[in-house]
Amino acid sequence: MDYQPLIARWRGSELDRWAQQLEQQIGKGLDQKRYGDLARWLQALEELPPVQADAIHLNSARVGASTATPLPTATAQQLHTTLGKLHPWRKGPFDLFGVHIDTEWRSDWKWNRLQTQIDSLQGRRVLDVGCGSGYHCWRMLGDGAKEVIGIDPTPLFVVQFWALQKYLQQDNVWVLPLPMEQVPAKLQALDTVFSMGVLYHRRSPLDHLQELKDCLRPGGQLVLETLVIEGALGDTLLPEGRYARMGNVWFLPSTDTLLSWLRKLGFVDEQLVDICVTTTEEQRSTDWMTFHSLKNFLDPEDASKTIEGYPAPRRAIVTARLPGDWSPVE
């Protein structure tokens, strides 16, 4: 997992301030003393068989790589077994040479809901906050982004990204092992910032929105996906205890409340572009994620409620822009 090419690329650019900190941040985020399972995951990364891709697929539901002829049976089995050592796979799906990684989330469904509703990613530098193994990062690259930076503090997801990168080999997409708090303050260097499935995990949603805003260049776009509730302006659910068995869920606003938060912080052109109830077809247990999933978090007698009695997960996608005229950086 070599990040030196990225650090070298950022030196002397508008991301130089981040480049100066990045090596230390990566060392902390991938500290084997802190993360006891990391050595096992890195060993799995080393055990992946060498395969040269004939085609790379970034614009299909299953991001991945393929060869003109099927892999030898032993190689395909080794690939399947080794990728399985990186369980659980949350975001996807992926397909590597016929090995279908059927992830917990059908993340392609979310991408389909937002893809035509956002500003073109052509030529843009993009940040994806809480990206997991990087599924949406690959899709952003496939849509023409100049550079995609995903950040996620979970080392397993970072190793999963590098397992994919072994075969996809795209030098302008990266997943960094760090949380949003480690992105330099007031960076003002990104053209589009995605935050999907993060806001409700923040004790202070307004602080998170401000951090996202501070990453953007003038005219840059925020793409935000989060849990919401039905209700009027000002309505917000603050769950007592757990929500859908998650202990770190804080604020679920109504969509009007969410849009008002964006206006309060100085965003413009705020829009609700999609809203839907999450189904057990979109989020479910699979052979690649064998733990409990959405159906275990809903009331077995009434799927419109969580196991705790709150409204079942409803997700909204909103977009907004930073004031100013956006233009690409050469």
Image (spheres, grey):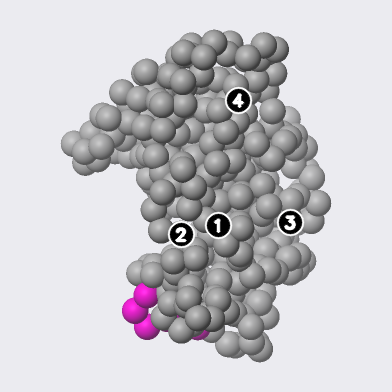
Q: Is residue 117 left or right of residue 159?
A: right
Q: Position of residue 305 (x, y in %)?
A: 52, 80
Q: Residue 113 carries which label?
A: 3
- Give, as a single range, the part of the protein colored magenta: 237-242
- Give the mark toward the camera: 1 or 3: 1
**Residue 221 covered by magenta stretch:** no
Q: Is residue 241 magenta?
A: yes
Q: Which of marks 4 and 2 is nearer the N terminus?
A: 4
**Residues at marks 4 and 2 touching, judged by CB atoms closer than 8 Å:** no
Amino acid type indicated by mark 2: Ser
Kindly report which numbered mark, 4 or 1, lies closer to the viewer in this rendering: 4
Residue 98: image tag: 4
Which of labels 3 and 4 is toward the front?
A: 4
Number of residues whose C-alpha sits closer than 10 Å to that of mark 3, classed few (under 14), some (14–19) or many (20 or more): some
Tell whether 167 sits left or right of 232. left
Q: Can you identify the residue that label 2 sits on?
A: 293
Amino acid of disc 4 = Gly
Q: Mark 1 points at which residue?
A: 283
Residue located at (55% from left, 28% from top): 99
Q: Which one is nearer the viewer's eye here, 252 or 328?
A: 252
Quarter of the figure with residue 155: top left
| Alpha carbon separation for disc pair 4 and 2 | 25 Å
Q: Is residue 87 above or below residue 188?
A: above
Task: Tell me what residue is drawn at x 70 percent, y 69 percent.
Answer: 275
Q: Which amino acid does label 1 sit on?
A: Gln
Residue 54, position as x, y percentages in the image: 68, 13
Q: Earlier in the sequence, mark 1 or mark 3?
A: 3
Q: Is mark 4 on a helix, strand or loop?
A: loop
Considering the image in quadrants, where does the N terminus appear? top left
CA separation, marks 3 and 4? 26 Å
Q: Earlier in the sequence, mark 2 or mark 3?
A: 3
Q: Which circle marks residue 325 in the picture?
A: none
